[in-house]
Amino acid sequence: MASIFRWIRQAVDHAELMDEVLPGQTVVEVIGEGRVLIEGHKGILSYDDCEICVKVCYGVVRITGCNLKLTVMSGCKLVITGVVQHIDFLQRAET
């Protein structure tokens, strides 16, 4: 399955198309200093007021800051509010 997505990624990169055309792609939007929208998540790995880790298709999105709150969560999107200081994208090793 990973090889199919790799092939699709190479085709999109070669055609210089926008990433949003890929099925199952995660979208992370930062809105100002205090709001993060994540679409296409796979669940919450850890959650407290200083750090929230979200599983996504390529690994983990880690948001750190102060007074972080999960204000919206559905099967496909979530919204995190608070003082966002860092967003890290942690890719899992491909095998």
Image (tube, rainbow, N blue to C red):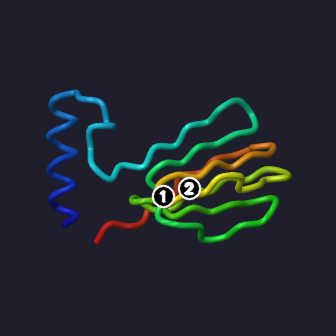
Residue at mark 1 to residue at mark 2: CA–CA distance: 9 Å
- Contact between labelled residues 2 and 1, with CB atoms less than 8 Å apart: yes
Dot 2 alpha-carbon crowd within 10 angstroms: few under 14, some 14 to 19, many 20 or more = many
Q: Nearer the viewer, residue 83 or 90?
A: 83
Q: Is residue 54 above or below residue 13?
A: below
Where is residue 29 drawn, in percent x and y?
Answer: 55, 37
Helix, strand or loop for disc 2 = strand
Label 1 or label 2, whichever comes before in sequence order:
1
Q: Quadrant location of residue 69?
A: bottom right
Quadrant of the image for the N terminus? Answer: bottom left
Q: Which residue is the site of mark 2?
A: 61
Dot 1 alpha-carbon crowd within 10 angstroms: few under 14, some 14 to 19, many 20 or more = many
Q: Nearer the viewer, residue 18 or 92?
A: 18
Mark 2 residue type: Val
Q: Which residue is the site of mark 1?
A: 41
Q: Is residue 10 above or below residue 89?
A: above
Q: Which residue is drawn at 49% across and 61% down?
A: 75
Helix, strand or loop for disc 1 = loop
Mark in the foreground, 1 or 2: 1
Left or right, 50 with respect to 35, comes to right
Left or right, 52 with respect to 40, comes to right
Left or right, 21 with respect to 34, comes to left
Where is residue 48 drawn, in percent x and y?
Answer: 78, 66
Q: Is residue 15 above or below residue 44?
A: above
